């Protein structure tokens, strides 16, 4: 009897523990959802403080068709098995290299973009992606995607690109195209994967994509001449340069790449100082190309945009003369802020001679948060509202919707963060009702906003282009 009593009591205790755990977890979920609601309301208020400006922006260079497909489904359909060991390649020549390359970036959940020298292989990959039931085709390329976003935000846009009639018809009808018509449709393949996706022994810590191309047109920036001719009459308040990663490891004839970048330098040097210049970084592995971009583009830019991988890559170039292929997918805020300070301390002191410009703005977009640094001596406006808009656009783009559903959003930032890795750094709290934190340092202001991370992913590619564009719009 006593034994049965103990068993009954034990069963009751077990039930009570289970109920308590359930109620505790339910309350935690409710508190997290309340926080999402408060942060969303605060971000929307900050975004709506500033009306969208009526202005002009010129964006170069290039465009393509993007075909999206699930990376694992494509590989399974082609019977491409996971390699024993991952390995990095600057270009892709065969299936073995492709498998090792995907595994290399997949294990870190890192984005990458590579040139495929084997045209037969690339065409087979595109055909396979196109055969998938959930494949998607859209107008793509950094410049074209930024043009689409800015046109969506009410900006008058000129795009430097060579387009076929079909590609031109896919653009927003308000976009003015500077560039001759093309009869060649260029396709880029975006192989996506989800957070927690597995491929053999490999597991991805976050959703991302490997972009492949065999692009023989966009690396030459062929619309640059027409773009230059149209610039003066168009009279934009901002010139945006993107898509230069198409040059990375592309087989140019000797001297051709340098000649194209020198021509781009002359275009940028001729832009009047009243017109700002923004350069959007991307994935680069060729240090010699990055050196040339530093010399011919970075030194002529007022503003830079980049993600959590491209920032440490830029720091490596500026301070050590090399590149970093992968980095932390979830970098600490203090780390990112210190790296931004490093970039600003070098490029923010450029002597303004012969068309060169002093860097006055940096925008870093990560999965968890957005950071914008602007010089207090510059004419960039509304940093707080721009940071909020960038954070909201990150969710809108990835979820594929303008209206944010709180049930499809989560916050992955802590409740507070250190402003630097130094011991004397201050700790800053995220305030849910006023989620954008801004403060002054030296001659610049920093604003940071948490991202409502999309949990129902529609697309991973193009996030940076859309986020950077949205942030820029409110600062002109």
Image (cartoon, rainbow, N blue to C red):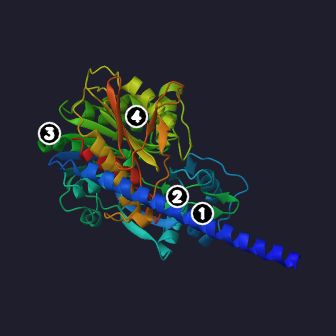
Identify the mark nearer the N-term, 4 or 3.
3
Query: Residue 358's x, y, as percent?
Result: 30, 26
Q: Label 3's element?
A: helix
List the residue tagged with mark 3. 232
- In terms of depth relative to the viewer, which is nearer, 426 or 335? 426
Front position among marks 1 and 4: 1
The percent position of residue 476, horizontal first and vertical second, equals 21, 41
On the image, numbered disc 1 is attached to which residue? 197
The residue at which mark 2 appears reads as 207
Give how far apart the Cα atoms at labels 2 and 1 are: 8 Å
Please state if 223 lies on the left or on the right of 11 as rendered.
left
Q: Which residue is mark 4?
A: 293
What is the CA distance from the residue labelled 3 to the residue labelled 2? 42 Å
Q: Crowding at label 1, few (<14), some or many (≥20) Cα neighbours within 10 Å?
A: some
Camera-side residue: 401 or 125?
Answer: 401
Q: Quadrant of residue 440?
A: top left
Front label number (2 vs 4): 2
Residue at 47% x, 30% y is 338
Which is more N-terminal, label 1 or label 3? 1
């Amino acid at each position: 009897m006593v034994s049965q009593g103990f068993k009954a009591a034990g069963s009751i205790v077990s039930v009570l523990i289970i109920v308590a755990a359930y109620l505790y977890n339910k309350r935690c979920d409710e508190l997290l959802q309340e926080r999402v609601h408060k942060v969303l309301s605060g971000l929307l208020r900050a975004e709506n403080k500033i009306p969208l400006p009526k202005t002009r922006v010129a964006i170069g260079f290039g465009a393509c068709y993007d075909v999206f497909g699930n990376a694992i489904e494509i590989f399974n359909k082609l019977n491409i098995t996971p390699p024993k060991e991952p390995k990095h390649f600057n270009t892709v020549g065969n299936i073995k290299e492709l498998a090792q390359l995907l595994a290399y970036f997949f294990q870190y959940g890192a984005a990458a973009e590579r040139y495929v020298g084997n045209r037969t292989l690339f065409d087979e990959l595109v055909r396979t992606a196109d055969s998938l039931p959930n494949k998607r085709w859209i107008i793509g390329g950094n410049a074209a995607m930024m043009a689409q976003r800015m046109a969506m935000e009410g900006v008058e846009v000129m795009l430097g690109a060579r387009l076929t009639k079909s590609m031109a018809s896919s653009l927003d009808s308000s976009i003015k195209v500077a560039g001759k018509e093309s009869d060649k449709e260029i396709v880029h393949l975006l192989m996506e994967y989800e957070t927690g996706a597995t491929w053999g022994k490999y597991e991805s810590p976050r959703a991302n994509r490997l972009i492949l191309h065999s692009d023989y047109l966009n690396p030459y920036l062929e619309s640059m001449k027409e773009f230059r001719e149209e610039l003066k009459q168009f009279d934009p308040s901002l010139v945006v340069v993107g898509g230069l990663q198409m040059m990375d490891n592309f087989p140019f004839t000797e001297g051709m790449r340098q000649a194209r970048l020198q021509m781009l330098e002359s275009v940028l040097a001729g832009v009047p100082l009243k017109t700002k210049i923004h350069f959007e970084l991307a994935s680069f592995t060729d240090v010699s190309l990055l050196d040339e971009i530093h010399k011919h583009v970075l030194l002529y830019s007022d503003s830079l945009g980049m993600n959590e991988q491209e920032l440490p890559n830029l720091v490596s170039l500026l301070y050590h003369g090399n590149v970093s292929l992968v980095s932390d997918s979830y970098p600490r805020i203090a780390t990112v802020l210190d790296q931004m300070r490093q970039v600003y301390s070098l490029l923010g002191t450029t002597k303004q001679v012969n068309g060169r410009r002093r860097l006055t703005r940096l925008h870093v977009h990560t999965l968890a948060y957005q950071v914008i640094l602007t010089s207090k001596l510059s004419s960039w406006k509304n940093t707080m509202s721009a940071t909020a808009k960038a954070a909201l656009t990150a969710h809108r783009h990835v979820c594929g919707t303008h209206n944010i559903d709180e049930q499809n959003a989560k916050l992955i930032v802590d409740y507070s963060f250190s402003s630097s890795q130094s011991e004397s750094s201050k700790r800053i709290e995220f305030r849910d009702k006023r989620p954008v934190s801004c403060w002054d340092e030296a001659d610049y202001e920093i604003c940071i906003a948490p991202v409502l991370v999309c949990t129902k992913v529609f697309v991973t590619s193009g996030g940076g282009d859309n986020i950077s564009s949205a942030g820029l719009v409110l600062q002109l």
